[in-house]
Image: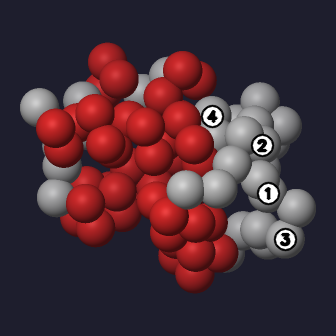
Amino acid sequence: MTELSEELKILFSDELRIATENIKADTSLFSSGIIDSFQLVSLMILIEKKYDIGVNSVDVSLDNFDSAEKIAAYISRTKAE
């Protein structure tokens, strides 16, 4: 797992109260039901605040938010823009 993916796991645990022991970088978060739509909204807000980025609603998709590594890649891409 990348450092950013590890940070996200801590965010999942501390802020969203999700058990992360079995979550790997590529674990499907939404497809498997680990994170629901209400938690997604909270996650987006947390990401915006923690990483000082804006999450565009058109970017909210399984391609960008279905695993810690996909979220980390999205954050990295968005910060680089």
Q: Amino acid type of disc 2?
A: Thr
Q: Earlier in the sequence, mark 2 or mark 4?
A: 2
Pointers 2 and 1 in contact (CB under 8 A)? yes
Q: Amino acid type of disc 1?
A: Ile
Q: Amino acid type of disc 3?
A: Glu
Pointers 4 and 1 in contact (CB under 8 A)? no
SS type, badge 2? loop
Residue positioned 63% across, 34% down in the render: 66
SS type, badge 4? loop
The location of residue 44, given as percent across then percent down, is: 38, 49
Which residue does the numbered mark 4 point to in the structure image?
66
Pointers 1 and 3 in contact (CB under 8 A)? yes
Which residue of the protein is positioned furthest toward the right in this rendering?
22
Q: Earlier in the sequence, mark 2 or mark 3?
A: 3
The location of residue 12, given as percent across then percent down, is: 60, 66
Q: CA distance from mark 3 to mark 4?
A: 17 Å
Which residue does the numbered mark 3 point to in the structure image?
21
Which residue does the numbered mark 1 point to in the structure image?
23
Could you classify mark 3 by the number of other residues whose Cα lies within 10 Å: few (under 14), some (14-19), or many (20 or more)?
few
Q: CA distance from mark 4 to mark 1?
A: 12 Å
Residue 74 seen in the current view: yes
Q: Amino acid type of disc 4?
A: Asp
Query: What label sits on residue 27 in the rendered view?
Result: 2
